[in-house]
Amino acid sequence: MIPKSPRPAEAENAVETLPERVREIVGARTGRDAKLVATVKAVKAAAPRYTWVGIYLLEGKELVLHNFIGRPTPHTRIPVAEGICGAAVRENSTLVVDDVNADPRYLACSIETKSEIVVPIRDGSGKPIGELDLDSDAKAAFDARDREALERVADLLGPVVAGG
Ligand code: SME
C-alpha cells in the first residue's frame, strides 16, 4: 500500500519521542521562559512539515505570543473571540484544521500556510492557560500521531505555565 503522505522514518521517530525530550526540558533547573523557548525549538526540530511553531499564553481575554520559530506573524496578540487559536481556548479542546483556507475562523499568518493544529495548555484544574500552535505549508499535515505527541507536550507544559 502506498501511504497517502510518505514521511521519512527519521521524522516520525522524532515526533514519537518528542514528549521524552520535552520531559527533560521541563525537568531542567532553568526558568519558565527558558523552558518554553527550548520546547518550541524541540517541537520545531521534530518534523520538517512543522513550518511554524509557537506558544501563546492566556492573559485575561487575550492570547499573547510567548515565543515562536518560523515566519513572522502579525498575530502576536489574539482575542479569545478570534481565530482558530481563540476557538481552541473557548472549546478547551485540540483543533486540527486540514485546510485553513476553508475555515472561516482562520487568521492568516502566512499565505503559504495550509494546515494548523492548536493544542490547549491547561492548569491543574483543567482550565486553558495557553496553547501550542503549529502551522504547516502542507495540507492535512497533522495526524493522530502528531496530535497525541503534541497533547503530551502541552500536558507537560501545564505546570510550567501555571507555576508562573
Ligand atoms: N492561524 C491562527 C493565528 C496564529 S498564526 O497561525 C501564528 C488562528 O487562526 O488563530
Image (cartoon, rainbow, N blue to C red):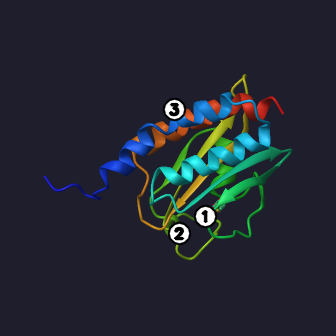
Query: Which sits earlier in the primary sequence, circle 2 or circle 3?
Result: 3
Q: Mark 3: which amino acid?
A: Glu
Q: Mark 1: which amino acid?
A: Tyr
Within-10-Å neighbours for mark 3: few <14, some 14–19, many 20+: some
Q: Secondary structure at mark 3?
A: helix
Question: Decide: marks 3, 1 in contact (CB < 8 A)?
Answer: no
Within-10-Å neighbours for mark 1: few <14, some 14–19, many 20+: some
Q: CA distance from mark 3 to mark 1?
A: 31 Å
Within-10-Å neighbours for mark 2: few <14, some 14–19, many 20+: some
Task: Give the residue at mark 2.
Answer: 113
* Foreground: disc 3 or disc 1: 3
Ligand 1 is within 8 Å of the C-beta of the residue at disc 2: yes
- Image spot of residue 163 (x, y percent): 81, 29
Q: Secondary structure at mark 1?
A: loop
Which residue sits at x=78%, y=31%? 162
Q: Quadrant of residue 104?
A: bottom right
Ligand 1 visible in quadrant: bottom right
Reply above or below: 124 against 148.
above
Reply above or below: 156 against 40.
above
Task: Give the residue at mark 1.
Answer: 106
Which residue sits at x=43%, y=66%? 138
Task: Give the residue at mark 3.
Answer: 20
- Residues 158 and 16: in front is 16
Query: Which sits earlier in the primary sequence, circle 2 or circle 1?
Result: 1
Q: Secondary structure at mark 2?
A: loop
Ligand 1 is within 8 Å of the C-beta of the residue at disc 1: yes
Q: CA distance from mark 2 to mark 1?
A: 11 Å
Which residue sits at x=39%, y=51%? 11
Which residue sits at x=41%, y=59%? 140
Question: Quick check: can you spot residue 25?
Answer: yes
- Image spot of residue 89 (x, y percent): 69, 44
